Image (spheres, rainbow, N blue to C red):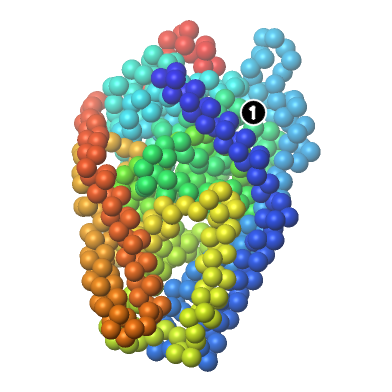
C-alpha cells in the first residue's frame, strides 16, 4: 500500500512539474486560440452561405450538428482566452503566510483571519476496490493541517470499517442510501461539525498540501468552495486514456477561464466547501445524479463565490471499462440535461449574472455536442445511397477541405499544443459515445430515473458488448456502406469525399469496438461488491482508537 501511495504522490508531482513546463498563457497559445476562433467563424460563414447549400436533408443534418459544435467551440475559445485570471490575490498570500501558528502546542492547527478552524475530510465510498479505498484513507489522514478524516460508506462494507479502524479514520455507515452520494455527504454533515469540509471520491488520493493550497482562499468570506482538477494515474486502457484526455482542456483552461465569470463549478471530488454556504442552500443537492453542478448553481444563485485552481492536488482513477465509462457519462449527461430542461440558466427567474448565465447554459447544453456525431454519421450514406449532398456540387473538394480544416483541424492543433500529441483515443470515444448522450436526453425528457452508481464501484463481471449494441449496429451499417462506396468510386473512376468520410467513421467505430473486444478477452472478473450488512441502527459511527484519533487531529 505504501508503494502505491508513493507512486500516486510521484505522479502528482510529475503532473505539476509537467504543467509548469508548458506556458498555458504563452503568446503562442493565445495566437493558436485566436486562429482557431477565426477558423470557427470562417467555417460557420461557409456553411451558412446560401450559395453553398446542397440537398435539404443532409444540409439540415450538417447545419444542426455543426451549429451546436460551433456554438460550443466559440464559447470555449472565449472562456479559454479568459484563463489568464489569477485567483490568488494579496489576501490569499497573506492568509497562507499566517495559516499555521508558530506556537509549538498547536503547530498543526490552521487559522483563517486569526481564528482556528475545524476541518473535516469526507471520503465517499460505495463498493469501490478496498485497496483503492485504503490508499485514499491513508493519504487523507496524512494531509497537512489539523483535520478529521471521515469515511462515509454507503457500500456498508466490513472491510472498509476495518481499514478505518486500522488507519485511524472515522467510519460512518447509514442504513438508507437515499439521495445517493449527495445524501451520503449530507448525512456526514449531520455528524461532523467542522466549519469546512473537503470531499474525495474513494479512488482519489489527495496530495499532502491539499489544505495548504486551498484553505487560504477562505479568507474571503464570500468564497463557498475551492475546486481542484480531476487528474488520473491509471491510463492503461483505451477507455481510460480517452476519458482522461477528453477532460484535459476543460480542467487546464475552461474551468480556469470560468473564474473570471465566477462560474467555475464543483465536480464532486477534490473540492473543499465552507459549511455555512452549504447550510444556506439546504445541503448538497439530492434530486439529481449530478449533485455537484446543481449544488454549485444553487450557491452561485445565492451570490456565493467559487474558486478553481489548476494545481494537481489529487490523483484518481479514470473509468477503465466500457461499462464504467458509459455509466459515468450517462450520469454526467443526465445532470446537464436536467439543468437545461428544468432549470434553464437563461431564464429571467435565475439570480445569476450575465456571464454566469452563459457559462451555465454552456454546461447544461454541452452534452448535445455528444449527440452531433450521430447526425454527421448519417450524412455520407445519404450521398452514397441516394445521391443527396449537403453542399452545392460547385464546391470543390479543396475548398471544402480548407474550411473544414479551419474548424476541426485547428481544434486538433489546439489540443495537440495542450497535450503534446494527437490523442486518437479522445476522438474515438467522442465519436462513439452518441448513444449514451441520446439516452440521457431521452431519460430526462420522459422523466426516467436510471439509478446511481459510483464510477469505480465493483460489481458482477459483464461483457462490454452489452453496453455498445447501438455502436455495433452502426459499425455494421457503415462497414457495408463503405464497401458500396468504394465499389461505386472504383466503377466511376473518381474518389469522393463521402467515401473518405464514411470510411473514416467506420475506422473510428472499429477502434472503439476493438477496445471492447480486448477488454472482453482480458476478462478481469472484478471483485463482486459484497451485499450490504444490515444493521438495526440507523447510523453506525466507529471512532478511531485513541492513539490513532490523536494522529488524525
Classify residue 287 as left or right of residue 399. left
Report how many numbered discs are placed on residues in the image: 1
Quadrant of the frame with the N terminus? top left
Q: Residue at x 64, y 28 (%)?
A: 212
Q: Residue at x 55, y 75 (%)?
A: 402
- Which residue is disc 1 drawn over? 212
Quadrant of the frame with the C terminus? top right
Q: Residue at x 26, y 78 (%)?
A: 487
- Whether residue 294 is visible: no
Classify residue 400 as left or right of residue 237. right
Circle 1: element type:
helix
Between 392 and 133, the one lying in front of the other is 392
Between 436 and 100, the one lying in front of the other is 436
Please identify the residue farthest to the top as the structure is shown: 547
Quarter of the image for residue 489 reads bottom left
Q: Residue at x 72, y 46 (%)?
A: 86
- For label 1, the crowd category at 10 Å Cα-Cα, with few meaning under 14, some 14 to 19 and many 20 or more, is some
Amino acid at each position: 500500500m505504501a508503494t502505491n501511495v508513493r507512486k500516486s504522490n510521484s505522479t502528482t508531482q510529475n503532473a505539476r512539474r509537467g504543467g509548469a513546463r508548458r506556458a498555458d498563457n504563452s503568446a503562442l497559445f493565445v495566437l493558436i486560440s485566436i486562429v482557431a476562433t477565426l477558423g470557427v467563424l470562417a467555417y460557420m460563414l461557409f456553411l451558412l452561405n446560401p450559395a453553398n447549400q446542397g440537398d435539404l436533408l443532409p444540409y439540415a443534418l450538417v447545419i444542426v450538428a455543426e451549429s451546436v459544435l460551433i456554438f460550443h467551440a466559440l464559447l470555449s475559445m472565449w472562456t479559454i482566452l479568459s484563463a489568464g485570471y489569477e485567483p490568488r490575490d494579496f489576501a490569499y498570500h497573506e492568509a497562507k503566510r499566517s495559516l499555521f501558528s508558530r506556537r509549538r502546542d498547536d503547530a498543526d492547527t490552521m487559522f483563517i483571519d486569526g481564528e482556528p478552524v475545524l476541518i473535516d475530510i469526507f471520503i465517499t465510498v460505495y463498493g469501490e476496490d478496498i485497496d483503492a479505498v485504503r490508499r485514499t484513507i491513508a493519504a487523507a489522514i496524512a494531509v497537512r493541517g489539523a483535520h478529521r478524516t471521515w469515511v462515509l460508506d454507503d457500500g456498508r462494507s466490513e472491510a472498509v470499517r476495518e481499514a478505518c479502524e486500522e488507519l485511524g479514520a472515522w467510519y460512518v455507515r447509514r442504513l438508507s442510501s437515499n439521495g445517493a452520494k449527495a445524501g451520503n455527504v449530507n448525512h456526514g454533515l449531520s455528524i461532523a461539525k467542522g466549519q469546512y469540509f473537503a470531499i474525495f471520491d474513494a479512488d482519489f488520493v489527495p496530495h499532502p498540501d491539499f489544505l495548504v493550497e486551498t484553505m487560504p482562499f477562505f479568507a474571503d468570506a464570500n468564497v463557498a468552495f475551492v475546486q481542484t482538477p480531476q487528474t488520473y494515474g491509471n491510463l492503461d486502457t483505451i477507455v481510460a486514456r480517452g476519458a482522461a484526455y477528453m477532460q484535459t482542456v476543460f480542467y487546464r483552461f475552461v474551468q480556469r477561464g470560468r473564474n473570471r465569470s465566477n462560474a467555475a463549478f464543483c465536480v464532486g471530488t477534490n473540492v473543499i466547501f465552507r459549511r455555512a454556504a452549504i447550510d444556506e442552500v439546504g445541503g448538497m443537492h439530492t434530486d439529481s445524479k449530478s449533485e455537484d453542478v446543481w449544488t454549485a448553481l444553487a450557491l452561485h444563485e445565492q451570490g456565493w463565490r467559487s474558486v478553481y485552481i489548476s494545481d494537481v492536488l489529487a490523483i484518481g482513477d479514470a473509468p477503465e471499462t466500457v461499462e464504467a465509462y458509459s455509466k459515468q457519462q450517462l450520469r454526467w449527461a443526465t445532470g446537464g440535461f436536467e439543468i437545461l430542461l428544468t432549470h434553464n440558466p437563461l431564464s429571467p427567474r435565475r439570480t445569476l449574472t450575465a456571464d454566469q448565465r452563459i457559462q451555465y447554459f454552456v454546461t447544461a447544453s454541452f452534452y448535445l455536442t455528444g449527440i452531433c456525431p450521430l447526425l454527421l454519421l448519417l450524412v455520407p450514406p445519404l450521398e452514397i445511397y441516394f445521391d443527396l449532398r449537403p453542399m452545392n456540387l460547385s464546391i470543390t473538394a479543396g475548398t471544402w477541405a480548407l474550411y473544414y480544416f479551419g474548424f476541426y483541424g485547428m481544434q486538433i492543433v489546439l489540443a495537440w499544443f495542450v497535450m503534446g500529441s494527437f490523442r486518437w483515443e479522445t476522438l474515438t470515444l467522442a465519436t462513439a459515445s452518441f448513444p449514451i448522450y441520446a439516452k440521457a436526453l431521452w431519460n430526462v425528457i420522459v422523466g426516467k430515473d436510471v439509478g446511481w452508481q459510483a464510477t469505480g464501484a465493483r460489481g458482477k463481471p459483464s461483457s462490454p458488448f452489452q453496453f455498445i449494441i447501438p455502436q455495433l449496429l452502426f459499425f455494421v451499417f457503415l462497414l457495408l456502406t463503405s464497401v458500396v462506396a468504394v465499389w461505386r468510386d472504383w466503377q466511376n473512376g473518381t474518389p469522393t469525399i463521402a467515401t473518405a468520410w464514411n470510411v473514416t467513421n467506420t475506422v473510428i467505430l472499429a477502434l472503439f469496438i476493438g477496445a471492447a473486444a480486448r477488454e472482453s478477452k482480458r476478462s478481469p472478473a472484478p471483485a463482486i461488491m459484497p451485499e450490504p450488512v444490515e444493521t438495526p441502527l440507523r447510523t453506525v459511527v466507529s471512532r478511531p482508537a485513541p492513539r490513532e484519533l490523536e494522529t488524525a487531529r
